[in-house]
Amino acid sequence: MSSNDFISIVVTGAAGQIGYSLVFNIIRGDMFGTEQKVRVVLMDIEPMLEGLKGLKMEIEDSCYPLVQEIVITSDPKTAFTNVDYAVLVGGMPRKEGMQRVDLLRANAAIFKVQGKALNDYAKKTVKVLVVANPANTNALIALLNAPNIPPENFSCLTRLDHNRAKAQIAMKANVNVKDVHNIIVWGNHSLTIYPDTRCGYINLPTGKATIANVIKNEAWLQGDFVSTVQVRGAAVISARKLSSAASAAKAITDHMHDWALGTPEGEYVSMGVHSDGSYGVPVGVIFSYPVTIKNGVYSIVQGLPIDQYTREKIDLTTKELVEEKESATKILAEM
Ligand SMILES: NC(=O)C1=CN([C@@H]2O[C@H](COP(=O)(O)OP(=O)(O)OC[C@H]3O[C@@H](n4cnc5c(N)ncnc54)[C@H](O)[C@@H]3O)[C@@H](O)[C@H]2O)C=CC1
Ligand SMILES: O=C([O-])CC(=O)C(=O)O
């Protein structure tokens, strides 16, 4: 995993609300296991360095034994040098009246710089997770600016959508979340993401049953369930007046944990990854697929049945991602 006896991970946007939860998940051992020492680089923009000093003090005061070193910085070279993992949370949030393309432009500049810094300073084996929105296309921009790092090493966070879908099914079926398996979320981390339960199953005391057979409500599975997952982020913002943070940090932790340590035999998780053309999605967009992971390498689950309804949902989210890619390509060409 690392040439040393510790793993080096950078978290950008570490002074923000996700960072405040995430960093403690990492140093507690939730991400890489309770025996794995970690060197954590906390990166944010210069005006946030004072806040990062406070976070560093809190980390020290928590006395977590896995902490090898805590570095705080706003300098990309210092942040990315020799890291094994990079979680890119920092970005420009959408402001009132801002169009999606404006958000893309503001973030393209950030992810161009960070992609180049990863390329120049990180280990060539670095595994990158982009969280900041628009997450799929920000990940693509970073990837395009890091030609020396394999495209398979870039991903974006859709595990929160996956976890949200799993939780909705568990609540509807009145079972524990740990008994719900093989949910899939397809596509873009946006309102078009498609949560799909057709391959999923639930472990009941009587044995394994399909989600459809337990829920027995196809209209709900194709209607309210899908829309609840799609608008869940907005629902949290509306209630909390802040976007999801602890649940996002948990999803990041799940994503990196599974990427580093693998998925249980037969278990799918959802990850935004560089499309290889699977399921008719064009090559070269960052698309959420069902994956299994072994020895740090993910494989897109192949051969799943795609019915007409699913095809339409996958096509819709694909169309949005292709349009985002076109906008990003134009924006990058103008820079
Ligand atoms: N993919 C997903 O499932 C989710 C994505 N998000 C996204 O994650 C991002 C972060 O969310 P929060 O922590 O709540 O936001 P926040 O606003 O609390 O924190 C963001 C941090 O990023 C920093 N930042 C801005 N530009 C930076 C740069 N160039 N380099 C380093 N740091 C920079 C800011 O100074 C701030 O400290 C947002 O874009 C949000 O939309 C949030 C939840 C779920
Ligand atoms: O919209 C946001 O900033 C937060 C987000 O992505 C989510 O909660 O899924």
Image: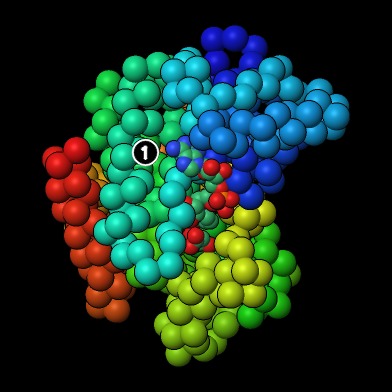
For label 1, count other residues whose C-alpha is less than 10 Å away and answer few (under 14), some (14-19) or many (20+): some
- Seen from the viewer's position, the closer of residues 302 and 247 is 247
Element class at badge 1: helix
User: In terms of depth relative to the viewer, which is nearer, 180 or 39?
Assistant: 39
Name which residue lies at 59% across and 36% down: 48
Q: Quadrant location of residue 150?
A: top left
Which quadrant, please, contains the C terminus?
top left
Q: Nearer the viewer, residue 226 or 79?
A: 79
Residue on which disc 1 sits: 110
Residue 315 quadrant = bottom left
User: In the displayed image of the protein, which residue is found farthest to the front?
Assistant: 47
Q: Position of residue 166 (x, y in %)?
A: 58, 66
Q: Is residue 218 visible?
A: no
Q: Residue at x 30, y 35 (%)?
A: 112
In the image, taking residue 219 as reference, residue 333 lies left or right, namely left
In the rendered structure, the answer to whether residue 317 lies left or right of residue 31 reads: left
Q: Is residue 235 left or right of residue 50?
A: left
Q: Percent position (x, y) of residue 136?
A: 35, 51
- For the N terminus, give its image quadrant: top right
Query: Vertically, is 100 above or below 127?
Result: below
Question: Would residue 308 be seen by someone viewing this image from the given angle?
Answer: yes
Picture coordinates of residue 242, whole percent (x, y):
61, 63
Q: Residue at x 24, y 35 (%)?
A: 144
Is the CB of the residue bearing disc 1 within 8 angstroms of ligand 1? Answer: yes
Mark 1: amino acid: Ile
Q: How many marks?
A: 1
Residue 13 image offset from top left, x and y in percent: 54, 40
Residue situated furthest top in the rendering: 4
Residue appearing at x 72%, y 34% in the figure? 55
